[in-house]
Image: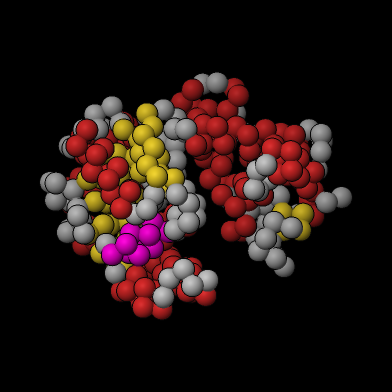
Amino acid sequence: MKNVAVIGAGTMGNGIAHTFAQFDYKVQLIDVQQTSLDKGIATITKNLDRMVAKETITEADKKRTLKNITTYTNLEEGVECASLVVEAATENVDLKLKIFRDLDKFCPDDTILASNTSSISITQIASVTSRPGMVIGMHFMNPVPIMKLVEIIKGYSTSEETFKIVEELSKKLNKVPVEVNDYPGFVANRILMPMINEAVETLYNGVAGVKEIDTVMMLGMAHPMGPLALADFIGLDVCLSILKVMHEGFKNPKYAPCPLLVNMVRAGKLGAKSGEGFYDYSQNRKAEDISKMFSQ
C-alpha cells in the first residue's frame, strides 16, 4: 500500500496528508477548491519548517515529504490509483454520504475507504457503498503530525481483514491505534465534548469567567489546556456539529449544545481560525487574551 488519497485540505486533511507523506507514502490530496489546496500545502510547508528548526527532521526530509504530495481538484482523477482513501471533509452527514457514494464508484474494487469523522456513524457511511466490509473509521487527533492516537472504528460490517490492515498502517505511521465500536462520538468525543459543553454552560450561567474555568481545569485536573481554549483550538463549529450528532444519536438531553455555543457559531465566532472565540486571537495566536465579549 503506497498510494493514499486524502479528501479535504483543511486542518485535519492537510495534517493527515503531511503524516503519510513524511512516512514515504505517495499522497493524493484532493479538495474541490484550489485555494484550499494551496493553503493546505502552505500549512504543511510551515509545519515542516518548524520541524526542521527544531531539528526533528532534516531539510532533505522536508523536501521529500513535499515531493510525495500531489494535489487534485477532481475526485475521480485523485483516487484512481489509491489503495486507501482517508476522507477528512467537513463534519456533515449528507456531504460525507455523497463523497462515499462517489468513492465507491471511482475507486478500484480493492480500495479501503476510511473516514476521519469524529462522530458520524461508520455503519451509516458504509451503507451507501457496495463494499461495507472495506469501510472503516480512522479518526486522527489534531495536530495530526504530533498526536499519537488514532481511533479505529469498525462499522457493523467492517471486515477483520480491513481492520488489521488499517491497524498495521497506523503503527507504521508511528501512531497508537485504539479499537472503538461504532456509537456516536466514539470514545474521544463522547467524553471530551460533554466536558467542553459543560465548561461553556458554566460560563453561560455566570459561575466563573473564561480564564478562571480554564485555570481550574489546568491546575486542578492537570489538563495541558483549558476546555474553552481547547474548544477554540478545535473550532466551535466543529464542537457544535459533534454535539448535535451525539444529541441526535442518543436522544439524551445531556448532549444538548449550550445556547451560548450555538449563538457564538451563528455569530461567526468559531475560535482561533476565525480570530475570536472565547479568546481573542487578533494580536496573539495563543489563547491568552480573553474575548471582549467575556472580559467585562
Residue 28, placed above or below residue 182: below
Region of the chain picked out in magenta, as a range: 15-24
Image position of 15 (left or right of 241) = left
Which quarter of the figure has residue 192?
Answer: top right
Which residue is at 22% across, 59% downward? Answer: 3
Query: Can you see residue 33?
Result: no
Which quarter of the figure has residue 138?
Answer: top left
Query: Which residue lies most toward the front here?
Result: 55
Image position of 264 (left or right of 179) = right
Which residue is at 44% across, 45% downward? Answer: 149
Residue 227 position within the rendered picture, expressed as x and y whole percent measured from the top left: 66, 43
Residue 100 position within the rendered picture, expressed as x and y whole percent measured from the top left: 27, 44
Image position of 28 (left or right of 225) = left
Residue 89: in magenta span:
no
Which residue is at 57% across, 36% downward? Answer: 193
Residue 59, placed above or below residue 123: below
Which residue is at 24% across, 51% downward? Answer: 84
Query: Which residue lies most toward the left here?
Result: 109
Residue 141 position within the rendered picture, expressed as x and y whole percent measured from the top left: 47, 48
Query: Can you see residue 225?
Result: yes
Of residues 107 and 231, the one drawn nearer to the viewer in this rendering: 231
Residue 80 position within the rendered picture, expressed as x and y whole percent measured from the top left: 17, 58
Q: How does the figure colour the protein chain or chains?
A: secondary structure
Q: Quadrant of the N terminus?
A: bottom left
